[in-house]
Amino acid sequence: MTVETGRDGDPKSEETALGSSASRNNPSRDKGRSNPCLRGILFLYNICFFVLGCAAVVWGVLSLVTESNAINIKGEFGLFLDANELDYQLHHVSTYLLVVVGVVVVPLAILGFYGSIRENKCILAYYGSILILVLIILCVMAGFSFSFKTSLSDSLASRIKSVMRDSLSELYGRDTQTIPENKLITEAWDSMQRQLGCCGISGNVSSADSWPYYSTRTLWYLQQYEEDKARFPSKGNTVQKVPDSCCHGGDLAVCTGQTYFPGPPNHLNPHTERFNKTNPYLYTNGCYDKLVSHTLKTYNTTIGIVSAIILLFLVFGIITAFCLRARVGGTSSPGVVMCKDVSG
């Protein structure tokens, strides 16, 4: 056996010299586990992934088992929809989907933990591949969602308008002091009309379902008219044609029709220009179209922001996982079995 002499005069064996030469010829063996930065980033990434998955599971389960969370349609606009049909089903579908996503994310995060700590090429490859698969599935689902979200179905639109007509014609403004349901309906309509700048059901200024609906088809107007006629039999019709919530400031009497105005709401679809003036204080468009556009705009913005964050989050995880795998090279932590090379 040949012996080499080091700088300090100590002998070095041929095996040692060969080992040093092999180390110089294969630098990846030295850099295989020198990835503290990438490993820390992936570890923190999976902490966020794990927390989000657990939160999704907990939130979904609580929504399913808590009866009070089972889609009671409340608020300003929800009184016009039937909670026992569409919204109840949508709530349960979205809740189950949330639970499924959480159940998938938690073990995936654990897999990422293990791969980042052990720096295992095989596990990191599996982890990154699964993230790519999830990204593809989400993109496909987003494409289908985008193609169907632009408009409501005709049957659903018809049902919503029917419920809106029934609530406005029979319940609005009637016995609000003694019937709590009528009070809630009235407050919901008033709040919606003020916030969305609308009046009535649907359509524009010439539609019978917009502002003219109040004076032609509601018990609210009929009750006012009969009471006014009983008190002032010789006086002309000066009752409100539309409620105050259909007005946006200015002369309230002109807006509601108590003071004469040569146009809405005193004249319904006049055939002469003389009685077709534009009332500057009255909302003349119906609420359905504005309600739909408001809802779609709100939810589309929220869904778009959330989707963008999720996609960027997944892309970041994919890049980090494969970068760490590339830096690991052919080494792994002690006690971890690497993926076997079956190419030959």
Image: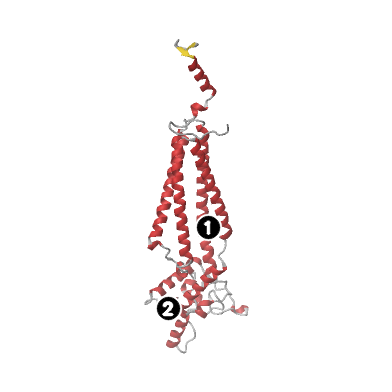
- Which residue position is annotated with label 1? 300
Q: Residues within 10 Å of mark 1 (few under 14, many from 20)?
A: some
- Which residue position is annotated with label 2? 174
Q: Earlier in the sequence, mark 2 or mark 1?
A: 2
Give coordinates of residue 299: x percent, y percent: 50, 58
Q: Is residue 274 left or right of residue 30?
A: right
Q: Residue furthest top?
A: 9
Q: Secondary structure at mark 2?
A: loop
**Tag count in the figure?**
2
Give coordinates of residue 149: x percent, y percent: 56, 60
Q: Residues within 10 Å of mark 2 (few under 14, many from 20)?
A: many
Q: Of 175 and 304, which appears nearest the observer? A: 304
Residue at position x 56%, y 51% from top?
139
Q: Amino acid at mark 2?
A: Arg
Residue at position x 55%, y 54% from top?
142
Residues under labels 2 and 1: Cα distance?
Answer: 36 Å
Residue at position x 50%, y 77% from top?
214
Residue at position x 48%, y 77% from top?
169
Camera sees residue 235: yes
Q: Residue furthest right?
A: 272
Q: Is residue 265 left or right of residue 187?
A: right
Labels 2 and 1 touching (C-beta < 8 A): no
Q: Eyeballing the image, is 126 above or below 147?
A: above
